[in-house]
Amino acid sequence: MEKNRYLFKMYYFGKSKYFGSQRQPNLLTIEDCVLEALINKKYIKNVKDSGFEASSRTDRFVSARGACFTCILKKKPILMEINSALPFEIGVWAYVKVPLNFLSRYNAISRHYIYMVPISLSTYQKTKPINIEVMQKACNKLVGKHDFINFSKREKNETVTARDMDLVELSINNGYLIFQFKSRAFLRQQVRRMVKKILELGMGEIQYEEFLKLLDPTQPISYQPANPKGLILWDVKYGDEIQIKEDKKSKERMEKFFVNNEIISGFKQELFRILQHNDFS
């Protein structure tokens, strides 16, 4: 039987029952649901032989609109057939056939994250003013190549901690602070830790000089990252030679899920509004 590898684009909403995207022993994850659906619909026989590989891993409560994975299938995919075996908050909505040696993680040329601060700007400003100007100054400083070890969860096997940030941007959307980050690759928890320190800077909890010290890898600094509920893996890009084909019905399924959940009040309403509308590129 001929082996064919496919690259898929998928969405998911980070409900509390999912312990992140990556498979873990004895815990339910996003990948578990996807693999179970592929086995259920006879696209793969088992996980071991499927060559399944995800482009990125996300923590518990993190959502995605354009996450990607590759898999070797026994037959050409029909996305709505796969979606029929998935919960409504998870779905595949685009795909393309790729070479057998294609790797969704290492062949990616850009990853785009959006972080929406869960507390509205007006709520923050009830206690103290927020210095947006110094926050934007910090965002500009992070653009380019830096050692981001102090903006990451330290891992024993992570030896190269320099990353090249193509975009770090702050805007205000419907009364909420929205960050955008683009890079070929990120360290573990890098986005949430950058957000945490930029917010502390804006609230006057640290000075700009203290923020700059975080870029010095010889001075280890430990702290907790920002709330994962505001983080969205927005998109992963592979270059013009990879033309991912959207499936109309599957994309409508995704948009319907976002619309149905937009009635939730406050932060979640705005989060689903952002997920629903393709306002960021």
Image (cartoon, helix red, strand yellow):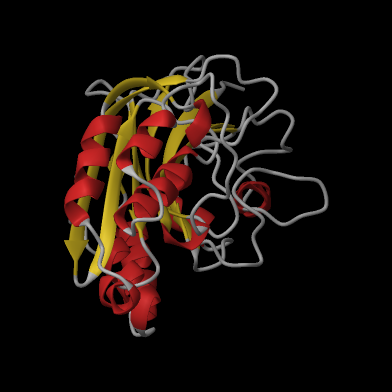
Q: Is residue 186 above or below residue 231?
A: above
Residue 173 % position (x, y): 19, 65
Quadrant showing the N terminus? top right
Which of 194 and 107 lies nearest the eye of the viewer? 194
**160 sits left or right of 128 in the view:** right
Task: Using the rendered view, name the quadrant where residue 123 is placed.
Answer: bottom left
In depth, the one of 45 and 61 nearer the eye is: 61
Residue 38 lies left or right of residue 27; in this view the side is: left
For the point 34% across and 68% down, the residue is 271
Q: Quadrant of residue 148?
A: top left
| 5 w.r.t. 181: above or below | above
In the displayed structure, does residue 59 sit left or right of residue 112? right
Q: Whole-percent x and y of residue 139?
A: 26, 40
Q: Nearer the viewer, residue 145 or 82?
A: 145
**Which residue is at a point 22% across and 47% down the rendered structure image?**
134
Q: Is residue 166 left or right of residue 104?
A: left
Residue found at the far right of this picture: 26
From this view, report whether residue 222 is shown above or below residue 176: above
- Tell me if residue 139 can be seen: yes
Determine if residue 65 is in view.
no
Q: Position of residue 35 (x, y in %)?
A: 64, 46
> Residue 183 occupies which quadrant of the picture?
top left
Please give the name of the residue rendered at 56% of the width and 22% of the height, measured from the top-left corner: 3
Q: Return the x and y of residue 162 as percentages of the image width and height.
A: 44, 18
